[in-house]
Structures are given as C-alpha cells and as structure tokens.
Image: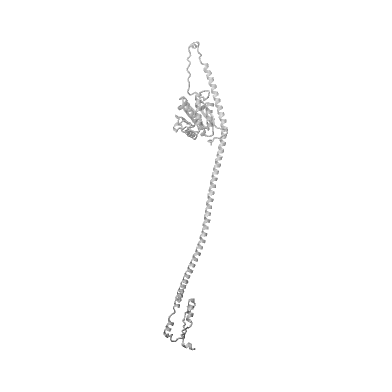
Amino acid sequence: MTSDDSKSPKLNLTTDIPEKLVDSPNLSDSLTMASEPTEIASTDSDKINIPVSEILMTIEEPQPEVKQPLETLISLSENSSSLKNEAQDLKVEIESLERQKRELNEEIKTLRSRKVQLLSEQTQEVEQTLRSLVQEGLKEFEQQKQALEIAVEQLERRRDKIRQEMRTTFAGVSQDLAIRVQGFKDYLVGSLQDLAAAAEQLEFPTTESWNEPLQTPSPVVSSSSTVQFTKQQFEDQTRKIERILEQYRKNPDYYGPPWQLRRTFEPVHAERVQKWFFSQGGRGTIRSLGNRLQNILITSAVMSVLYSLYGDRSRTLILANSPERLGEWRRGLQDCLGISRGDFGPEKGVVLFESPDALIQKAERLVDEQYQPFVVIDETEDQIDLSLLQFPLWLGFARDPKQMSSYLY
C-alpha cells in the first residue's frame, strides 16, 4: 500500500442485482457504474471530513435510477402472463371456429346432396306428369279422330243414299206423273162421252123460241181467277213489283214495318224473284240456292210483294215434311219480314203444313172465301201432289243436281 492509498481510502461499492434484471439494457450502464470502485481522494485532508456513518448510509440508500426499470420489468412480466392467457383463449376460440367450420361444411354437403335428390325427384314427377298429359291428349285425339271418321263414314253413306234416292225418285216421280196423266186422260174421255150422251138427250128449241129475245147473262168476274204477272197484262202491277224489288236491292230498310223485307237483297235473289213473277207468271219452280235460309229470303221477298199488292187478302201456305223444317221456316220468316209468332196460325197470314192434303183443303177454303192463297213447297218434298198445281200462286224450290244442299244431311 502506498502512501497515497493510506491517505485516501478507496471504497468498492457493489450491489447484488437479481439475475432477471441483468438483461435489462437500461440497467447495464448503471450497474457498471455501481460495480466500479468509487474512489474518494482528497489531496487536502483538511478540506474532506466525511463521517463513516454517512458514507454507509449513502451506500445503503437505494439508487433512484434502478427503481424505475424494476417496476417496468414487473409490469412487463404481468403483461406477458396476460398475453399468454389471451393466446390460450384465442387458441380455444380458433379450435371452436374450426370445429364450426367443419360442421358447416358437412351441413353444406348434406344440403347439396338433399338439393340434388329433390331436383331429381321433382324432375321425375314433372316427367311423369308430362308423360301422362301427353298420353291423355293422344287418347283424346284418337277418340276424336275415330268419332270424326265414323261421322264422315255416316255422312258419305247418307250422301250415297240420297244420291241413289234422287236417281230413283226422279224416275218414280215421272212414273207417277204418267199414271196421273193417264188417269186424267181417262177421266176426260169418260167426261166427253157423258157429255155427248147428254147432248143427244137435249131438246132443241122450236121456231117460236127463236123469235123470243135472248137474255144474255152478264159475265161474272171471279176474283179467284188465275193471276198472270206478265208485261202484256197488268202493267201497273208489273211496274209496282219492279219498283219494290229495286228498293229492296238498292235501299234495304232493316227497321221497316212488318211484312216488309228487312234483309239484304242480292242480285241473285232479285233475278229469281223477277223470273218467278214475270217469266213464270207466279206459278212454277225455281232452282234452290242450296240453303234453306236463302230460299226463305226469296220467299220473304215474294210474300212482301204480294202483301203490298193484296194486303190482308194474301195468305201464305208452306209445305214441309218435318216439324224441324217448319220451325226453320217460321224463324226465318220472322227474321226477314219482322212478323211475330201471332202471325202464324190457321186464320193468320202464314199457315204451316206437313201434309199436302190438309194444305189443299185449306187453300180451297181460302179461294171460296175470296182470299189469295200462296203455296210454298220446300226443297225436301220429293213428290208433289198435282192438286197443288191448281192454285193461282205457287212456288216450289227444285234441287240442283250438281250441288248438294247443305241441310239435307
């Protein structure tokens, strides 16, 4: 030991620091300073006078620079423990989320498989439904086809039958006419023979009777004489008829009074009516238009003209062989002439008959009562009673052999 060492003793101050605090970077410098010996030297002994107790107290007092890093380390250790707890909680939560993810994936797979199954089932149901609908539709079409084929066959058979009847009926009518004509001839021959026998039995006047003045009877004009619509006679009636028909053709009145034509009157209709009036003299047949409604329209025009000429004295007698056809005539005349159901009846303007015998009796009574009967014969009448032809006005519709009527089936 030198003299300097004895005069100024040196103090080596060390502080025991826990191992946990050794690694602190902020504490390294302070520990280095504390580990280094502190030398208190003084060249002047008079000036340094420090008691040992104060030095020891100074040594024992904690260093303020070391206290703050220790607290920081403690707080950091606490934070690390809390972080570890949070990490464990997060790990548990992640495991639960992964488990939920697996469950959701499995559920999605299940739903997808269920969806595919439902789609397949629905597709099968739709296919079965469509197949059943198609089969039902095909069955209905087949049934309709069979029904139509049967109806066509029936109509064809009926057409052939009607054609056969037409071919045989005309011959039958001709034969019947020949028989009737022969009978009428025999009747005339017999009547002439009776007349000759009666003439032989007559007493001839004497010479005195020749000197007596003869009383010439005045001619009696019968209102039931045969009507002739020709241009040589009855010029006034001819002009009136032409004027009425021209009015019906050019200026139809659809809301006119009853017994006036209320329908469109075409040139084809006017041609047939004029032919019946002026060429046939109001007695004869005209070719049918192939439709009962068209025939009713022509008849309505004739009835309207006759009503304008004769008024209430005109009576129309219609002959058809079935109630259905007579019903069509009634409805058609009501529609064309604006008449009502009350205009049909035995004592009315229009009378409907199924039998020619009843019609003939009614027409004869009308003639006796000074009425003007107008006889209309439907197209479907195959055989015509010759007694119908004795009346002054009659109209018959003849079938066209080249055209089948639409209401014969």
Q: Position of residue 248 (x, y in %)?
A: 50, 31
Q: Position of residue 286 (x, y in %)?
A: 54, 30
Q: Nearer the viewer, residue 301 or 14?
A: 14
Q: Position of residue 114 (x, y in %)?
A: 51, 59
Q: How many marks?
A: 0
Q: Nearer the viewer, residue 105 or 381?
A: 105
Determine if residue 359 is in view: no
* Residue drawn at the location 55% of the way across and 27% of the way down: 177
* Residue drawn at the location 54% of the way across and 44% of the way down: 144
Q: Position of residue 187 (x, y in %)?
A: 53, 23
Q: Is residue 159 left or right of residue 54?
A: right
What is the basis of the colouring in this image?
Answer: one colour
Residue 13, above or below 381: below
Determine if residue 181 is in view: yes
* Residue drawn at the location 51% of the way across and 61% of the way down: 108
Q: Nearer the viewer, residue 301 or 220?
A: 301
Residue 202, above or below 237: above
Residue 22, above or below 153: below
